[in-house]
Image (spheres, coloured by chain):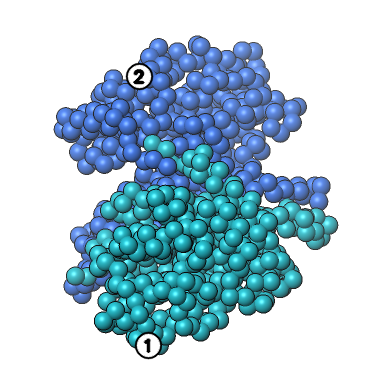
Amino acid sequence: MRFALSEDQKLLQASIGKALEALSPLERVRQFADREEATAPDLWAGLTDLGLPGLLVDEEHGGLGLGMVEAAIAAEALGAAVAPAPFLGSAVLAPLALKLAGSREQQVKWLPMLASGKITAGVAISEAVAGARDGAGVDAHDLMLDGKALFALDARGAGLLIVADRKGELHLAAGEPPQMPMNSIDATRRLSEITFRGALAAPLASNGALDRLRDAAWIVLAAETLGASQAMLDKAVAYAKERKQFGRVIGSFQAVKHLCAEMAAELEPARALVWYAAYAFDQGLEEAPLMAAHAKAHLAEVGRFVARTATEVHGGIGITDLLGLHYWFKRIGQNRQLLGGPERVREIAARLQGLTAA
Amino acid sequence: MDLTETAEMAAFRGEVRGFLGAHAGDYAGGAAKDVKAWQARLIDNGYAARTIPRAFGGFGAEPDILKSRIIAEEFIAAGAPRGIANQGVSMLVPTLLEVGSDEQKARWIGPTLRGEIVWCQGYSEPGAGSDLANVQTRAVEDGDDFVISGSKIWTSTAAQAQMMFALIRTEAEAAKHEGISYVLIPMDTPGIEVRPLKTMTGGAEFNEVFFTDVRVPRDQVVGGRGRGWFVANTTLKHERGMLGDPNATEARLGALIELMKTETVDGERIVDNPIFRDRLMQLQARVLAMKFNGLRLLTAAVTGESAGVAGLVVKLQGCELNHQLAALAIDALGELGILYHDGPHLRAKGRWQWNYMFDLGLIIGGGTAQIQKNIISERGLGMPREPSAAKA
């Protein structure tokens, strides 16, 4: 029994973290957010050097063939850097959809391109996972799609789109889809509204793969929030050790120390929950969906607490654009709602263990 | 990350399970029929006093954290009592093993393990709670004896105990932390008075103990004169570990889920109410997080790595979580939740209400939540200590 990251996993964690220091410093994040760039190809190219786009792609298709624990490690680092990278859609959900429900032909065609970073993929599963709003929903017929998908992930500049229809079946549409940007609080992650009018799409296998995609998305969002929250705590502690008021560093006041201790006390056990959810996913344990749901919902709550508390520890400067702390605050806020807010996800957690009325 | 069990551990689990099945008649409803006989049987089989040397009355196994965990899990799963786990066994015995003299080890450990001697802990005083090193109960030398005067508070089991291990100020001239000794005191010594301390639960789970010219031989000091603060600190760790045990929390969650599935209001199960269900799910996530945090600590202990912040948060988070579980149970019971003591409508013998009140004491005791936050921020996050009032 060993419940800890392996040496290889620690190495991966360190190398992604180090790469992101150079690839995604605050100035780069700010530039991406301010200029409303569709994508940050420089950043993705740098992460491609580490093999990140192919993390979950089998080696025979040019990937690293790793699992959800490694994906969670990467997501944590990306969250810590609020990196504007299409990791969730392009490196996690699309490869998983192809692996679980793609034909051999589709796998051979698309996976190597995704793994090599030659193209990225978008994913539109919001209606199927978080519920349909504003009349959104996609219908499939005769290898064509009609309708509207909101909150599509990583669809800007994508060469491929994975779409869930109203029935929860998955489809693959080649090329960049026609879309409108959806401006959200978090300008470091691009969301799109996609309209389909007889768009050509190939169906993926009808085998319930959507549930696995949902679990994977929940784990990755939870891991991202974990990383972003830890970064906010670290910044708050560092600031409290430097900032002086009343002739002493504010970190020596118990009122401030206790806020930091409370953040740490919430975050550390949450880390173990994210690890376990990823482990359960990789092992295909029966409880894997429940663990993914709990990780998503719990990190949403812990993230919200840390985001507001860490901001508060910074005092007035915490809410300014000057400091840029708000990028982390907003990423955490976005991850909370994306693909299901905690109330919805907890209801699914209850249903998964038969705790809802028949 | 690999949570599969090796063949050796799986076999060991089978052994423990077999033992508990074979002796199910010796315990019912979670309590041993004969506590001392059960304890003796557990020691013989290595399920109690497992790593304590045979010479002192233990089982004498090499420390194996995984096996200890398997034992804990299987006993909880079977609803079997864990043998004697009072403060003598959990705190005094480890202390003696670490710093006691050979004579002290030989004299006290065996009878303590067998349940022949019950101990109480004499640490806190009215003026020494969070600031434990401020103990004022003092001893003056008189020939071969110490003569002790003062008082202790929060002393569980003082009425049943034959012995107390206590922090006593023996060196009047020494600095605060260096004037304390760890002293073993027979409770039948003339001059000791025990008064029950009734709490909000209605029971007297604690006592006050008063000392008036109590004579104790000076060789009853453990770990050297003036070293008591450091001796006590080595064992306080054990207490904090006990207070945040995720196995106990998981068992409580299981009982809460059962309660919410069986209790009905107007014919509707509590768990079918979406608000209660949501609260339950929030707490379940927390219980799971503490459980997996426990696995992480276990791995760190096996590999000898420091668990860092993950270890420091257990007492704070675990006690709070236990309290919240009891709170949800009471809320789920609605008006039935206010019943207490006895009566035909009382659920679970009032255990939830008792836990809700008693566990507030556990949030405060064993290092208050605020002291825990100081520890987390100072040792875990490297934040500076609050300057003392005199210096500020």
Q: Is residue A213 left or right of residue B144?
A: left
Q: Quick one: which chain is cyan?
A: A
Q: Vertical placement of A343 versus A23: above or below?
A: below
Quadrant of the drawing holding the C terminus of chain A: bottom left
Name the foreground residue: A8 vs B38: A8
Q: Vertical placement of A66 versus A290: above or below?
A: above
Name the foreground residue: B156 vs B110: B110
Q: Give how far across and how far down residue B178 sits, in percent.
A: 70, 28
Quadrant of the drawing holding the N terminus of chain A: top left
Which residue position holds label 1? A197
Residue occupying the point 29% across, 30% down: B7
Q: Give how far across and how far down residue A200 sits, in percent.
A: 35, 80
Q: Secondary structure at mark 1?
A: strand
Of circles 1 and 2, which is in front?
A: 1
Evaluate whether label 1 is on the same chain as label 2.
Answer: no
Q: Give how far across and how far down residue A211 sits, in percent.
A: 31, 65
- Mark 1–mark 2 Cα distance, whole angstroms, equals 76 Å
**Is residue B248 something that shows in the picture?**
yes
Chain of the residue displaying label 2: B
